[in-house]
Amino acid sequence: MERIGAVAGRVAATKAAGRDVVVVVSAMGDTTDELLALARKVSANPSRRELDMLLSAGERIAMALLSMALNERGVPAVSFTGRSPGSSPATPTRTRGSSRCARSASRTSSRTAAS
């Protein structure tokens, strides 16, 4: 939790300096390796889609904890998955490339603008 606190401190300081901040997190520590090991225990050849779903759990944990730490410091924060800011059919996310290496091409959403 020390690293989460350090990141939250840096984000809070940046925000206090008057700058807007967007943070992209990764899973903490060895979480990704641990999740991959679990997948290999149940399947010798897990599908790429299910691996993506499994590994995103580590990132979701990290983003939720960071959001909590920021809110605790008085910095309003909301965690989003890659899909959640534009999750309605009216605001689709368009990408270039396959799901594992896609880059966002466009997204329009009032949720990201209001955050």
Image: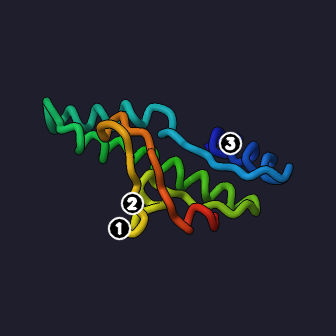
Q: Are marks 1 and 3 in contact (CB under 8 Å)?
A: no
Give left or right: position of 111 versus 49.
right
Seen in the picture, residue 39 relative to 23 is either above or below; the reply is: above
Is disc 1 placed on a helix, strand or loop? loop
Mark with earlier residue (1, 3): 3
Look at 37% across and 40% down and name the residue there: 96
Is disc 3 placed on a helix, strand or loop? helix
Quarter of the image where one finds residue 113: bottom right
- Amino acid carrying label 2: it is Pro
The residue that label 1 is drawn on is: 89
Look at 56% across and 68% down and name the residue there: 110
Seen in the picture, residue 30 relative to 13 is either above or below; the reply is: above
Q: Quadrant of the N terminus?
A: top right
Look at 61% across and 59% down and name the residue there: 68
Q: Residue furthest left?
A: 44
Pinpoint residue 77: horizontal percent, then vertical percent: 64, 60
Give left or right: position of 108 versus 42.
right
The residue that label 3 is drawn on is: 7
The residue that label 2 is drawn on is: 92
Q: Are marks 2 and 3 in contact (CB under 8 Å)?
A: no
107 or 26: which is nearer to us? 107
Q: Quadrant of the C terminus?
A: bottom right
- Amino acid carrying label 3: it is Val
Q: Do the residues labelled 1 and 2 touch (CB within 8 Å)?
A: yes
Give left or right: position of 67 versus 12.
left
Question: What is the spatial separation of the Cα atoms under label 1 and label 2, in whole angstroms?
Answer: 6 Å
Within 10 Å of disc 3 (Cα), the crowding (few <14, some 14-19, many 20+) is: some
